[in-house]
Amino acid sequence: MNRPHPWMPVSPCGQGCLPAADSVPTVSRMHQMLRLLATTALMLAGAVLVAALPMLRPGQQERTLRAWYRALLRVLHVQLVVTGGDRFARPGVAILVVSNHTSWLDQIALGAVQPLRMVAKKEVGRWPVVGPLARRLGTIFVDRERLSALPGMVDAMARALAEGAAVGAFPEGTTWCGLASGRFRPAVFQAAVDTATSVRPVALRYRVAGSGPTTVASFVGTASLCETLIRVAGVHGLIIEVHLLPFLRAACTTRRTLATRAEIAVTARNSVPGTGRTGWPRSWGSLSPQRSHGGCS
């Protein structure tokens, strides 16, 4: 693969990372088609829903969006398991949520916990149905092929955080299979540093009921969004775990330090399957999500 610049995120994960066809429990073709039809109908209904959001109060907007994300998971028969809290931050408190990136399902799972203004590659804006929805939900798009586009992305994130928004980003910059993961790049953390906004690391993990972690939902290789959706709709007992990890304070630190700490926290949690341990260094402590207006002590 030719990269426009040496810093463009690239994942080595591909078709070879996906499980063998007979290694994952599946549903009948009829049930798979019913799931796909229900998902399509719900996505189209989402366009109407998003258009109506401005008429609702902020609290109603969040509850409506959260219910819609959860409905998407239900029609795909994907079970959501959340640990570490029931939302990323208190209502009205700005937060930067960062997680590992495996699938387009990641954004739905995060939104089912608390709707976020996501940072996404510009290609998402061109996806049918999904693109218009993403734009209406305030998604911050970035052109990964243009290194010069990063400052604009950071500025847009900083403005959103300064306005009290909850912003979500995938610092790996691209999708990995879930069993392997990439380095957390520091650019997105600059917005948290600039606004002294706390960072909430989140570990996402996919598994099949009665079994261990799986790569079946991975959006890797040459597969299209449609192909991945069809694959996910055919799985029986798919579970997505969303583990909310302790907050990182952004005041008086650097973006590289934040990136390293968030990556270690997420990787540690995902590398200890079947346990409640997070691998979180005790010396970091558990910080409350709050904006610091001065002083580093």
Image: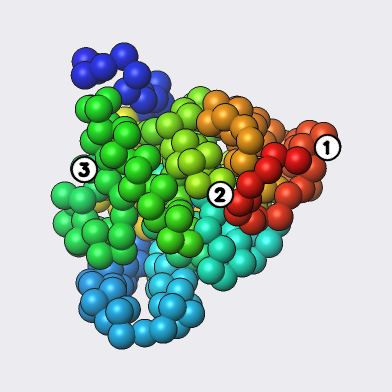
Q: What number is the disc on residue 123?
A: 3
Q: Earlier in the sequence, mark 3 or mark 2?
A: 3
Up-down relation of residue 78 to residue 142 (above or below) = below
Question: Which residue, given by chain and number where applicable, does mark 2 sit on?
Answer: 197
Expressed as whole percent of the image width and height from the top left, the position of residue 108 reads 42, 59
**Crowdedness near tag 2: few (<14), some (14–19) or many (≥20) residues, C-alpha within 10 Å:** many
Q: Residue at x 25, y 27 (%)?
A: 148
Expressed as whole percent of the image width and height from the top left, the position of residue 94 reads 53, 58
**Crowdedness near tag 3: few (<14), some (14–19) or many (≥20) residues, C-alpha within 10 Å:** few
Q: What number is the disc on residue 282?
A: 1
From the image, state whether disc 1 or disc 3 is nearer to you: 1
Q: Are marks 3 and 2 in contact (CB under 8 Å)?
A: no
Q: Residue at x 35, y 43 (%)?
A: 155
Q: Earlier in the sequence, mark 1 or mark 2?
A: 2
Q: Does residue 121 appear to the left or right of 163 in the view shown?
A: left
Nearer the observer, 212 or 157 = 157
Q: Quadrant of residue 95?
A: bottom right
From the image, state whether disc 3 or disc 2 is nearer to you: 2
Q: Does residue 2 appear to the left or right of 277 in the view shown?
A: left
Whole-angstrom CA distance, mark 1 to mark 3, is 40 Å
Q: Residue at x 27, y 25 (%)?
A: 147
Q: Earlier in the sequence, mark 1 or mark 3?
A: 3
Colour convention: rainbow
Of the 4 image quadrants, the one containing the C terminus is top right
Up-down relation of residue 237 to residue 276 (above or below) = below
- What's the residue type where badge 2 is placed? Thr
Up-down relation of residue 196 to residue 131 (above or below) = above
Can the viewer see residue 227 in this picture?
no
Expressed as whole percent of the image width and height from the top left, the position of residue 65 reads 41, 73
From the image, state whether disc 1 or disc 2 is nearer to you: 2
Say how many tags the image has. Answer: 3
